[in-house]
Image: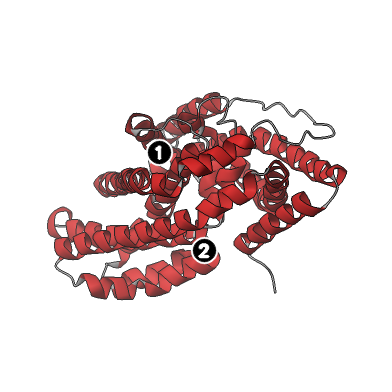
Amino acid sequence: MKLGLVPKIIIAIIIGILIGQYLPEDVCRTVVTLSGIFSNFLKFVIPLMILAYVTMGIADLSQGAGKLLLITAIIAYGSTLIGGTFSFTVADTLFPSFISAGVLEELAKTAGKSLPPFFSISIPPILDTISAVVLAFIVGLCLSSLRGKEIGDTLYNCFKDFSKIIDQVLTHAIVPFLPLYICGTFVDMTRSGKAFVILSVLWKVFLVVIAMHLILLFVQFMVAGSFSGKNPFTLMKNQIPGYTTALGTQSSAATIPVNLECSKADGVCEQIRNFVIPLCANIHMCGSMITITACATAVCLMYQIPIHLGTVIPFIMTLGVAMVASPGAPGGSIMTALPFLWMIFGKEQGDPNGPICALMVALYITQDSFGTACNVSGDNAIAVVVDKIYKTWIKK
């Protein structure tokens, strides 16, 4: 039986702890060295991934259904912002009770005990992340407005092919080696004494995040039901196949066919469900935003990095746009978020190939299936609202 990404990450964490706890230092440094090489490769790929996905996301997003596109995008972005703000509010209230002064003292004792690699291979990125974002926005916006008018499809097709290449890199080179990356991080954390302190906190974070997903979904379907005049509990019942499919696949893209059937059961007309569900699979990331924001808050508290609403809101607003570019595959959202974590952790500690970001990847991926299930379920709540708007105002 083929293991999914979450079981592999969990196994990698366990193996990393065992290696760090029981094997000689040379073995530990070997694993840390391999993990470091991969992290440098990841740092090289991230700007290319932003350039490919953000460009295509904007170019495709700007095509099509006029008012409905704008309405759907505003609702999806608003939902994502609400999810992130809600997550920070809850995490900032509850997590300090999990992460006591005693936990912080134990972490402080481990400072400066990280294992050095035997060697490192420098792989300088072609672009830095900010340059990649700016270039992607320029090219994407120009493609969306000029394609078919002043220029042909040649450049659009080039970026489409480039996006497929990055898909292959992500699928065959990044995601398969993420367990090695996480394993090396936990080898180092175990050797330095951080691992057991951190793991004592994470299970509580995990439960709070899942509870927030379910609360947000309940609110979304209550609002959608009230707005459309439909029974919200029936809407939630109809969504069960989509929710469970997303749990199993960890992929919003793979869940689209099932989600379309759920939308049909909700009474959403064909043209609206065929428009909204695939679109929202790419732009509506409320569940992923909840997970990323909560995990970032927990990491900040553990490492005593200052965090407040003033730093979180710009991060949520930026990430809400950037995650339009995230691929609908396991771990896609956290890969898209990595270049922007510096907005929370600071320039030095927010380095995408640093240990804190590696911990964020591990934290996120263990909860990725629940975040994806929240994303795709919320897509159908949006579809119900847009369907009502279409039938009541736009169609007439």
Q: Quadrant of the N terminus?
A: bottom right
Residue 334 is left or right of residue 223, and the answer is right
Provide the secondary structure element on which disc 2 rests. helix
Question: Which residue: 53% across, 69% down?
Answer: 248
Label 2 is placed on what type of residue?
Ala
Q: Position of residue 269 (x, y in %)?
A: 27, 67
Q: Quadrant of residue 214?
A: bottom left
Picture layout, residue 272 above or below residue 144:
below
Residue type beneath disc 1: Val
- What mark, if any, has residue 321 been given in the picture? 1
- N-terminal-most mark, 2 or 1: 2
Q: Residues within 10 Å of mark 2 (few under 14, many from 20)?
A: some
Residue indicated by mark 2: 254
Q: Residue at x 78, y 33 (%)?
A: 116
Q: Position of residue 159 (x, y in %)?
A: 57, 38
**Residue 386 disc label:** none
SS at badge 1: helix
Foreground of the two, 130 or 36: 36
Picture coordinates of residue 300, whole percent (x, y)? 48, 37
Instruction: Count neighbours of disc 1 (C-alpha within 10 A) and say few if under 14, some if 14 to 19, many if 20 or more.
Output: some
